[in-house]
Image: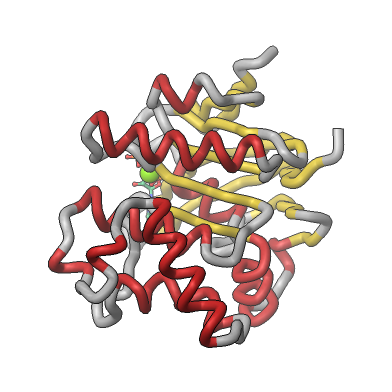
Amino acid sequence: MKAAVAASLLCKTYLTEDAKVEVFKDLSFKIGKGKFAVLSGPSGSGKTTLLNIISGIDKPTSGKIVVFGEDLSIKDEDFLANFRCFNIGFVFQSYNLVSTLTVAENVAFPMEWIQKQENYMTNRIEKLLEVVGLQHRADHFPFQLSGGEQQRVAFARALANDPHLFLADEPTGNLDAKTSLKIVQILQKLKTEEKTVIVATHDEQIFRLADQKLCLEDGKLVNLNE
Ligand SMILES: Nc1ncnc2c1ncn2[C@@H]1O[C@H](COP(=O)(O)OP(=O)(O)OP(=O)(O)O)[C@@H](O)[C@H]1O
Ligand SMILES: [Mg+2]
């Protein structure tokens, strides 16, 4: 199996002033190129922490995280920002839209980073907003949108640069059935396009798409396929 993501002996411990939180220890796993992986586990088990480390947003305390052949644990911020922009789409659990930018500007953001042409961006924004059903909201600001709408803008932004690796953190957690279905359809499309997808979720509909099922519990990763 060709790995898109390979972790070896990954550990993460948060040190706060008065406590030490050991989130996970010695995680070793691989996610194959073009595979759809789901990550489950109770609240606080480290799903978001692990996605942050896979995307290079956060560093492991020790261990190695290799994504498309690059060891992200030893790279500097400039490399990581660029690497993310070209290779990774991330839908955060809390959306993380830029509050001072409109919907269209939020979606443009990753494309501006890699200096796409203005015309290309305009067309692409229109297409992406159509995919998530928010064409009519292009000029609105995040605070004018519902949680589910912000979630969908986050999807459009994460898809902007057509990433090889797509990460989503509980993407249907706050959505009604109809909007969830839209998100599941987008994920399904990424699967047919053979993108590598990792979704932290407990959603049964998303589980059905999974080639690999991983579960975080008590600081360990259990491979549910075995
Ligand atoms: N910056 C931080 N400083 C200290 N502890 C942290 C920090 N970030 C996360 N933690 C702790 O690490 C653990 C894992 O958090 P994480 O957000 O990864 O869990 P999760 O599985 O995504 O939970 P949820 O399902 O609620 O989203 C939690 O106990 C959390 O309190
Ligand atoms: Mg989380």
181 horizontally vs 122: left or right:
left
Query: Residue, x 72% and y 44% (percent of image)?
Result: 7
Quadrant of the image for the C terminus?
top right
Q: Is residue 218 visible?
A: no
Res 95 → quadrant:
bottom left
Q: Quadrant of ligand 2?
A: top left
Colour basis: secondary structure
In this view of the protein, which residue sits in the foreground, 54 or 106? 106
In x, y percent, where is residue 69? 83, 56
In this view of the protein, which residue sits in the foreground, 135 or 163? 135
Would you place residue 112 above or below residue 86 in this image? below
In x, y percent, where is residue 210? 58, 25
Would you place residue 135 above or below residue 33 in this image? below
Query: Residue, x 58% and y 50% (percent of image)?
Result: 166
In x, y percent, where is residue 120? 56, 78
Res 201 → quadrant:
top left
Quadrant of the image for the N terminus?
top right
